[in-house]
């Protein structure tokens, strides 16, 4: 018999399932988090749970919030289990199961007044976000805030009834300012280089469209610390629910499965205070940029390097891609040859050891991460994790053949069929547009590079155009295997 998760059931959890060591009734809210998805519950919420377990900072509990339709179902499922989450850490040889309780409330999505009322309360000293790389309304090519996006235009016209996270944050800050309450710190927990700067530009950029004075005050008075976050966390499916129920005896409507590894590096800029997360492994530093650059280019860029050849070869799971005869060798060769030389190491970090650890994490067979998840949203991820490395290489006159091949495989993937002829389902918010560019690129590679909001000036760089065109032509005429082989043998 499995135990249905709830506060009342904590005393009856099966052996081997850890419960919070603190009383939930002792917790008080301090952080409002927008985007209560799997990654947040496997990362920030786990660090806070660790902190509460050692008896520290119980006035920094989480209040959840969401701005998307799926958040309604998420809230209902979590409310039915008293906001608790089961986190299953999986490695090849073992699994560790724990119930976390750092979140104590969840504001009903689309209840603007409830959201703004909570944002105005003095006890909320941090507002954090996990809204995905594509949720910041920035141009992929320029990485600048896009004021013309329809959602932003809406919030600029209806500043008192916003629907985006950034409109709500701006309105919440405006209310605090009017009430004489010090501003909260705004902390992004998304995989974006300079995520604090990007978040500031989104919040202040939106405010500028309707209230320039407020925008000026936000830029002057509100802290937006940068951070680097890392933990591989796949989506939850019935597979994970069944494993938890049948192997560990817990019934959880939305458990989180993840790897054991986790990392969080944060710029130490919190004028209104912060929890003492350094006590549980978080690194606070004056400069996050070196850690961000390392992670985005080696791990996130590495994801793209294995995802698209695997997708074209009908490989389903990430660990299966790392068992392939070519893909892990391509990943290693590409990163040693083209990526590591343009990644300055953070203090006391061995880049080669980090690269090896990343490959080991990709190969974890227990995670069940899918290739389709890694292929998702390439139109936002390529400009963040692949193309900046291309630009640095080109600036130094170095070869970009492998990096151009990664983007060419993305283009080939966007044509919508794997090499076996299997249809690739839409896997990007801009899928129709990508397909419309990818199909003619078979004969004219410049048709894909013409998406300047993605490729920018690279579409005019002769060295890049030649490398991309050669790689794409080979993929169509010789196939993935032969094209990877040519690169590995130095022929490409």
Image (cartoon, rainbow, N blue to C red):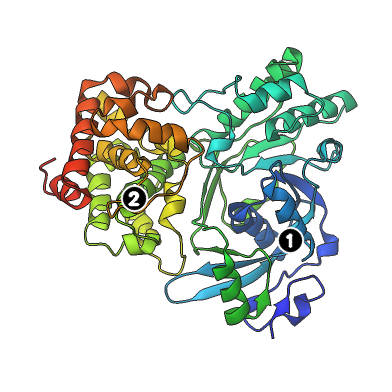
User: Within 10 angstroms of label 1, few (less than 14), some, or many (20 or more) residues?
Assistant: some
**x 37%, y 26%: residue:** 455
Q: Is residue 143 above or below residue 60?
A: above
Q: Nearer the viewer, residue 394 or 441?
A: 441
Left/right of residue 25 with respect to residue 348 in the rendered view: right
Front tag of 2 and 1: 1
Mark 1 residue element: helix
Query: Quadrant of the image for the N terminus?
Result: bottom right
**x 61%, y 42%: residue:** 131
Left/right of residue 164 with respect to residue 457 in the rendered view: right
User: Do labels 2 and 1 touch, CB within 8 Å?
Assistant: no
Labels 2 and 1: the sequence-earlier one: 1
> Residue 421's x, y, as percent?
30, 52
> Residue 440's x, y, as percent?
30, 31
Mark 2 residue element: loop
> Residue 245's x, y, as percent?
63, 77
Residue found at the far top of this picture? 212
Q: Which mark is residue 77?
A: 1
Question: Could you say which quadrant of the image residue 168 lies in?
Answer: top right
Q: Nearer the viewer, residue 247 or 186?
A: 247
Query: Quadrant of the image for the C terminus?
Result: top left
Question: Could you say which quadrant of the image residue 93 lies in?
Answer: bottom left
Q: Is residue 270 above or below residue 21?
A: above
**x 34%, y 20%: residue:** 457
Residue on which the image places disc 2: 350
């Amino acid at each position: 018999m499995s135990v249905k998760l709830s506060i009342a059931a904590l005393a009856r959890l099966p052996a081997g399932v850890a419960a919070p060591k603190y009383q939930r009734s002792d917790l008080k809210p301090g952080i409002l988090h927008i985007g209560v998805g799997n990654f947040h519950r496997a990362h920030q919420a786990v660090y806070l749970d660790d902190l509460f377990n050692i008896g520290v900072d119980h006035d920094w509990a989480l209040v959840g919030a969401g701005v998307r339709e799926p958040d309604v179902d998420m809230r209902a499922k979590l409310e039915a289990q008293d906001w608790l989450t089961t986190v299953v850490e999986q490695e090849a040889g073992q699994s560790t199961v724990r119930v976390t309780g750092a979140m104590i409330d969840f504001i009903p999505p689309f209840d603007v007044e409830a959201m703004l009322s909570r944002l105005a309360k003095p006890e909320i000293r941090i507002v954090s976000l996990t809204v995905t790389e594509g949720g910041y309304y920035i141009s992929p090519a320029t990485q600048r805030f896009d004021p013309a996006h329809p959602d932003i235009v809406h919030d600029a016209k209806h500043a008192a009834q916003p629907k985006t996270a950034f409109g709500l944050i701006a309105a919440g800050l405006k209310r605090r300012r009017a009430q004489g309450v010090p501003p909260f710190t705004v902390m992004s927990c998304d995989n974006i280089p300079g995520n604090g700067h990007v978040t500031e530009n989104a919040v202040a950029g939106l405010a500028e469209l309707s209230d320039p004075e407020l925008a000026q005050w936000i830029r002057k008075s509100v802290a937006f610390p940068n951070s680097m976050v890392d933990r591989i966390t796949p989506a939850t499916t019935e597979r994970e629910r069944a494993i938890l129920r049948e192997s560990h005896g817990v019934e959880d409507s939305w458990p989180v499965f993840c790897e054991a590894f986790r990392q969080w590096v944060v710029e130490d800029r919190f004028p209104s205070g912060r929890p003492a997360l350094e006590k549980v492994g978080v690194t606070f530093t004056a400069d996050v940029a070196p850690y961000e650059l390392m992670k985005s280019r080696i791990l996130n860029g590495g994801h793209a390097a294995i995802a698209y050849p695997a997708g074209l070869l009908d490989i389903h799971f990430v660990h299966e891609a790392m068992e392939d005869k070519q893909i892990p060798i391509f990943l290693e060769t590409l990163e040693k040859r083209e990526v590591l030389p343009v990644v300055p190491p953070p203090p006391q970090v061995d880049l080669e050891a980090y690269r090896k650890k990343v490959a080991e994490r990709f190969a974890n067979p227990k995670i069940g991460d899918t290739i389709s998840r890694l292929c998702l949203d390439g139109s936002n991820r390529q400009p963040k994790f692949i193309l900046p490395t291309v630009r640095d290489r080109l600036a130094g006159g170095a070869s970009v053949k492998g990096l151009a091949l990664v983007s060419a495989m993305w283009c080939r993937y966007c044509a919508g069929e794997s090499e076996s002829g299997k249809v690739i389902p839409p896997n990007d918010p801009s899928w129709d547009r990508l397909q419309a560019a990818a199909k003619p690129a078979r004969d004219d590679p410049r048709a894909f590079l013409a998406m300047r909001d993605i490729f920018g000036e690279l579409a005019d760089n002769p060295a890049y155009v030649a490398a991309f065109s050669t790689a794409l032509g080979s993929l169509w005429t010789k196939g993935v295997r032969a094209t990877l082989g040519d690169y590995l043998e130095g022929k490409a």
